[in-house]
Image (tube, helix red, strand yellow):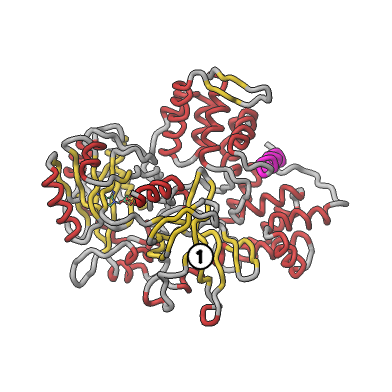
């Protein structure tokens, strides 16, 4: 398929922010695409070059792109820079410049989606000496053979900043409507919009099946291909495979032990809630891979965990779910998540880090056993398997500490034990429940004593004054509402002045600077990528921020590199906490 067809769709998507329209545009488009081009097109439509679970990256930031536009368009860097300042978007800049240059020349061949994706993937493979120049050259060539609008979206794809606002939900629903829409009885309005679905149950079944397949594969491409080729049966047959991460099951919050029993039944299993990082561990013979909750591959950063899994997991092929928690080498006591968070990004001195900041892996679930999915087995059965195959070696790897009980008193004692040994509280688990990837359905619940902090994404920041002038030192934070980020306050406390003392302004500045989209005086607009945890005194209603709420005395408590912007606190959570505090 021609890339220009996809570009037409980008343009139409960019022209509206309405989710339903997005969904409609995408679903009509998907219907037309040959199955052979479907996977490629869906990836590009989402602004991706690799599926979510693939750790390869292009590694090309705005500065390098500027140079590539300079080579492709022949315009001076100064001019490109000033255009960039004006529009805040290098995609638009390349559109304007290439349009100007292109007026007289005519291209002899068409770019296809496959060709574009191949070229972009080739970029990721360029490494070593001279790689910067090679990348710039390759992108310049691609831009030279592109039409202005094509250049715009190629640039945006490389910079991972599509600005078309297509969320996971829209793509999922578009797949449902594209491939199952004909099977549904639907009422349309005069304008041709869907106003009612008569067989809602059937519709929900399609949505659930597509969502399930996506949760397991983490990639809409195979889901759409299966739907197009084999219909519902095709997507129901899609299975997980060891080595490819799937979304983790999420926890619901309960207020107290009674609510825990209400949700999970009596008896239920209560486990320590370790304050560490989630690890999804894949073992296939001697090959071990470790993924975070965001499904980033962190295998290289945790060599000791790879070793433990090889030695102490007595089964060749498994996928395990666990929490890795840091502990002090001196006292043996557990440390809060923050202490090991730096290991997630670490690229050098890894061995020393693993010795200085060791983790203990607490296995609490199993997703695949001997190459077969066990998600539909009851939790208590899965736990039996874990106990059979994990050799408990404290401070290395073990089965999460737990009790099965129907007695509130026993839970209270166990809760105290959990807190006393440095944990956050307890998890409650329903004995008969399946493992539901990506879902927060209340089969596992968290029971924590303290007031809930919020996980928020940084959307803007401000350069500081005086001593702080080289740092971005005040952060505008947003929560999530149906794929939109809504602002909820500004925080500038909780960070340290010196790097050695913990999360510092300098570290935040390092993280945020590459994400700057636009500068307006002291303020910078950022790509919403960095998630931080924020404590506060109170949530108030406020017209100042787009969420309609503001935080009183917000304080940054920690960086959450293990969280992606899609998993931050939702507006709904904010509303719930607000009404609870009123009580
Ligand atoms: P929260 O991050 O507050 O939503 O709490 C859920 C998280 O607690 C999970 O994503 C895990 O990373 C972590 N966790 C710690 N201990 C356990 C456990 N025993 N079972 C399940 N999750 C756990």
553 or 464: which is nearer to us?
Answer: 553
Mark 1 element type: strand
Report the residue marked by disc 1: 475
**Range shown magenta:** 3-14
User: Quick one: label 1, few (<14), some, or many (20+) residues within 10 Å?
Assistant: many
Residue 187, percent from left and from top:
58, 19
Residue extending farthest bottom: 467
Tell me, yes or no, whether the highlighted magenta stretch contains residue 83.
Answer: no
Q: Is residue 353 visible?
A: yes
469 or 550: which is nearer to us?
Answer: 550
Q: Is residue 289 visible?
A: no
Residue 46, percent from left and from top:
57, 44
Characterize the magenta stretch by its predominant secondary structure: helix
Q: Is residue 214 shown above or below 104?
A: above
Image point (75%, 42%), residue name: 110
Image point (34%, 37%), residue name: 441
Q: Is residue 502 shown above or below 175?
A: below
573 or 167: which is nearer to us?
Answer: 573
Residue 540: quarter of image: bottom left
Residue 104, percent from left and from top:
88, 52
């Amino acid at each position: 398929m021609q890339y220009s067809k996809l570009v037409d769709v980008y343009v139409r998507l960019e022209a509206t922010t309405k989710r339903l329209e997005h969904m409609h545009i995408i679903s009509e488009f998907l219907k037309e695409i040959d199955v052979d081009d479907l996977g490629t097109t869906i990836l590009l439509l989402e602004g991706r070059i690799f599926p979510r679970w693939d750790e390869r990256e292009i590694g090309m930031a705005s500065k390098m792109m500027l140079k590539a536009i300079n080579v492709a368009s022949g315009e001076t860097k100064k001019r490109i820079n000033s255009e960039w300042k004006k529009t805040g978007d290098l995609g638009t800049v390349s559109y304007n410049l290439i349009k100007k240059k292109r007026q007289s020349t005519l291209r002899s061949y068409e770019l296809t989606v496959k060709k574009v994706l191949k070229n972009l993937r080739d970029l990721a493979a360029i490494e070593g000496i001279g790689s910067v120049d090679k990348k710039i050259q390759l992108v310049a060539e691609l831009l030279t053979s592109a039409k202005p609008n094509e250049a715009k979206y190629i640039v945006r794809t490389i910079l991972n900043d599509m600005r078309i606002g297509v969320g996971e939900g829209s793509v999922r629903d578009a797949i449902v409507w594209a491939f199952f829409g004909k099977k549904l009885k639907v009422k349309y309005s005069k304008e041709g919009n869907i106003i009612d679905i008569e067989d809602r149950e059937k519709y929900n079944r399609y949505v659930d099946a597509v969502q399930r397949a996506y949760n397991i594969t983490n990639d809409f491409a195979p889901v759409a291909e299966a739907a197009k080729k084999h219909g519902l049966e095709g997507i129901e047959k899609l299975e997980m495979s060891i080595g490819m991460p799937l979304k983790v099951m999420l926890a619901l919050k309960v207020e107290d032990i009674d609510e825990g029993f209400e949700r999970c039944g009596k008896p239920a299993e209560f486990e320590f809630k370790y304050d560490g990082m989630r690890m999804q561990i894949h073992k296939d013979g001697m090959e071990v891979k470790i993924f975070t909750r965001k499904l980033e591959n962190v295998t290289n950063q945790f060599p000791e965990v790879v070793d433990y899994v090889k030695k102490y997991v007595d089964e060749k092929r498994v996928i395990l779910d666990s929490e890795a928690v840091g502990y002090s080498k001196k006292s043996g006591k557990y440390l809060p998540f923050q202490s090991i968070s730096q290991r997630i990004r670490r690229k050098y001195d890894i061995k020393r880090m693993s010795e200085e900041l060791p983790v203990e892996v607490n296995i609490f679930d199993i997703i695949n056993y001997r190459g077969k999915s066990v998600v539909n087995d009851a939790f208590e059965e899965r736990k039996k398997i874990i106990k059979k195959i994990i050799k408990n070696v404290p401070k290395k790897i073990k089965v999460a500490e737990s009790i099965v009980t129907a007695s509130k008193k026993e839970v209270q004692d166990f809760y105290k034990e959990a807190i006393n040994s440095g944990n956050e509280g307890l998890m409650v688990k329903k004995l008969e429940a399946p493992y539901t990837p990506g879902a927060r359905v209340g089969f596992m619940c968290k029971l924590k004593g303290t007031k809930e902090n919020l996980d928020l994404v940084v959307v803007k920041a401000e350069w500081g004054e005086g001593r702080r002038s080289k740092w971005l030192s005040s952060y505008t934070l947003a929560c999530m509402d149906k794929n939109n980020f809504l602002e909820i306050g500004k925080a500038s406390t909780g960070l340290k002045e010196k790097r050695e003392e913990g999360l510092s302004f300098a570290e935040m500045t390092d993280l945020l600077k590459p994400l700057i989209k636009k500068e307006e005086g002291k303020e910078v607009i950022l790509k919403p990528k960095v998630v931080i945890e924020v404590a506060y005194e109170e949530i108030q209603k406020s017209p100042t921020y787009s969420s309609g709420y503001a935080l009183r005395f917000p304080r940054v408590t920690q960086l959450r590199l293990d969280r992606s912007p899609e998993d931050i606190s939702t507006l709904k959570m904010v509303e719930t906490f607000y009404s609870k505090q009123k009580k």
